[in-house]
Image (cartoon, rainbow, N blue to C red):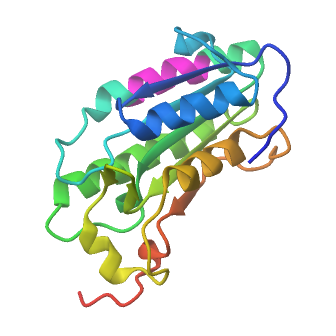
Amino acid sequence: MRITLPDDTKSSVLGESCAVATAIGNALRAQGATASINPEASDIAVAVLPLDPATQVPALTQVCAQLERIAKAMHARGGGRIVVVLSAAAAVPIRHRREYSQAMAAAYFCVRVLAMDYGAKIQVNAVGVGHVADGDDIIGDPAFLRHVPLPRTGTHDNIVNTVLFFCDPLNSYINGQLLCVDGGWSVGYGRNF
């Protein structure tokens, strides 16, 4: 996907250190953004939360506080984009992963609150990730695939392109939304519970 970023766009990718985060950072740089070591000075900030439901639940108080600081700084400068990459469990809870599902839903509500509070000048959105298998990198529970209308896994490019979509200056009227990149898992296809 190709987008046109304004000159001197600064971006930062924070949170989970993983192949998806690396791919997002590389894609933003390929679009002309320069990497910023200070997320609060960024024009685009992407936060990647743990995407595997078997991992430890993230400390959301710290994540939301950091996103709040970034949103305030962007708002004070007059604009910016925040994209939070989280699990599709933010939309539909995963059976037997109650705490993880609750954490993802809370992270999405953090996105909505930031969009409500700072939406006059910045856009804050979320990407909900389902099962991804790209090379050796596997994200999410393979059981997701039993409940997906599209009979395949997602790829890093599917996630990266959705993040770029939210960062594209042409998208100027989307705020506080969750776009699930999960092959349809979150619509409840073929659920038996």
Residue placed furthest toward the left: 96
Q: Residue at x 31, y 72 (%)?
A: 144
Q: Reply yes or no: does residue 69 show up in magenta.
A: yes
Label the magenta part by its dominant secondary structure: helix
Q: Nearer the viewer, residue 26 or 70?
A: 26
Image coordinates of residue 130 in percent, x first then y, are 40, 62
Q: Is residue 90 above or below residue 94?
A: above
Please state if 180 lies on the left or on the right of 66 as rendered: right
Image coordinates of residue 99 in percent, x first then y, are 18, 53
Q: Residue at x 41, y 60 (%)?
A: 88
Q: Is residue 70 above or below residue 128?
A: above
Q: Nearer the viewer, residue 128 or 102?
A: 128
Q: Residue at x 42, y 86 (%)?
A: 189
Q: Residue at x 36, y 47 (%)?
A: 106
Residue placed furthest toward the front: 135
Location of residue 3 by image quarter: top right
Location of residue 185 by image quarter: bottom left
Image coordinates of residue 65 in percent, x first then y, are 40, 23
Q: Please say whether residue 186 is visible from this viewpoint.
A: yes
Location of residue 95 by image quarter: bottom left
**Across the whole image, how many numbered discs are drawn on residues?**
0
Q: Please say whether residue 81 is visible from this viewpoint.
A: no
Quarter of the image for the C terminus: give it.
bottom left
Q: Reply yes or no: does residue 135 show up in magenta.
A: no
Magenta span of residues: 64-72
Q: Is residue 138 above or below residue 186?
A: above
Q: Is residue 42 above or below residue 147?
A: above
Image coordinates of residue 63 in percent, x first then y, are 37, 28
Please state if 31 lies on the left or on the right of 17 as rendered: right
Please state if 84 lies on the left or on the right of 28 as rendered: left
